[in-house]
Image (spheres, rainbow, N blue to C red):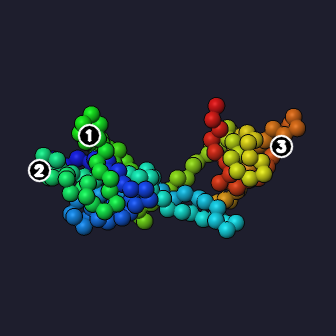
């Protein structure tokens, strides 16, 4: 019975490895995520591997020879623990596949609720902590910041905030 295994790839060659595994009739899965990055002064969504340097392959090691995987272009080999490859729980891969959108990319939209503690992680207010008040359109949010000893309402980009860590 096939199981999912982790395949280590050469640096930044995840897609090359996946393509070559598929050509050899192996079933593979490369979870990708949309990450907002600033390029030329503008925010753009960049599609990157969720686990850089790794992908998943479905193999039946009882009936399939895994040796060709090591010599596949872009692949280093199967990840091994205690002398042999260990399968990944099928639920992990299934959940990742279900999280993908129609374009095969996992979107990392972070939902905030009124009253959530947030931290500003980018922009001129970076490092300040506050409370999430409300969304103001698709790209902006209202937050309450403690500035100069009193609560001040500010509007910032949704991309500039994250859940506050303790």
| Residue topped by disc 2 | 63
What is the x, y in percent for residue 12? 44, 59
Q: Does residue 38 sit above or below 54 in this rendering?
A: below
Which residue is rendered at x = 48% and y = 59% of the image? 48
According to the picture, the residue beneath numbered tag 1 turns out to be 86
Q: Is residue 32 above or below residue 151?
A: below
Residue 90, given in percent of the width and then of the height, sits at 28, 45
Q: Which residue is located at x 26 percent, y 40 percent? A: 86
**Mark 2 packing: few (<14 Cα in 10 Å), some, or many (20+)?**
few
**For residue 49, what is the image quadrant?**
bottom left
* Badge 2 element: loop
Q: What separation in Å lies between label 1 and label 2 (alpha carbons)?
A: 16 Å
Name the disc covering residue 152, or none. 3
Question: In the picture shown, does residue 90 fall above or below 30?
Answer: above
- On the picture, is 2 further left or further right than 38? left
Q: Distance of mark 3 from mark 1, alpha carbons? A: 53 Å
Mark 1 crowdedness (10 Å alpha carbons): few <14, some 14-19, many ≥20: some
| In contact (CB < 8 Å): disc 3 and disc 1 | no
Nearer to us: label 2 or label 3: 2
């Amino acid at each position: 019975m096939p199981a999912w295994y982790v395949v280590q790839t050469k640096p930044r060659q995840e897609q090359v490895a996946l393509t070559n595994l598929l050509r050899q009739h192996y079933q593979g899965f490369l979870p990708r995520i949309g990450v907002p990055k600033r390029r030329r002064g503008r925010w753009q969504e960049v599609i990157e591997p969720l686990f850089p340097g790794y992908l998943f392959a479905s193999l039946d090691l009882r009936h399939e020879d895994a040796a060709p995987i090591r010599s596949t272009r872009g692949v280093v080999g199967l990840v091994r623990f205690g002398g042999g490859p260990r399968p990944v729980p099928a639920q992990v891969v299934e959940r990742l596949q279900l999280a993908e959108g129609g374009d095969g990319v996992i979107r990392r939209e972070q939902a905030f609720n009124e009253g959530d503690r947030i931290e500003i992680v980018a922009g001129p207010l970076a490092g300040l902590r506050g409370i999430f008040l409300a969304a103001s359109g698709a790209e902006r949010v209202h937050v309450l910041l403690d500035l100069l000893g009193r609560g001040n309402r500010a509007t910032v980009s949704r991309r500039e905030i994250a859940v506050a860590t303790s």
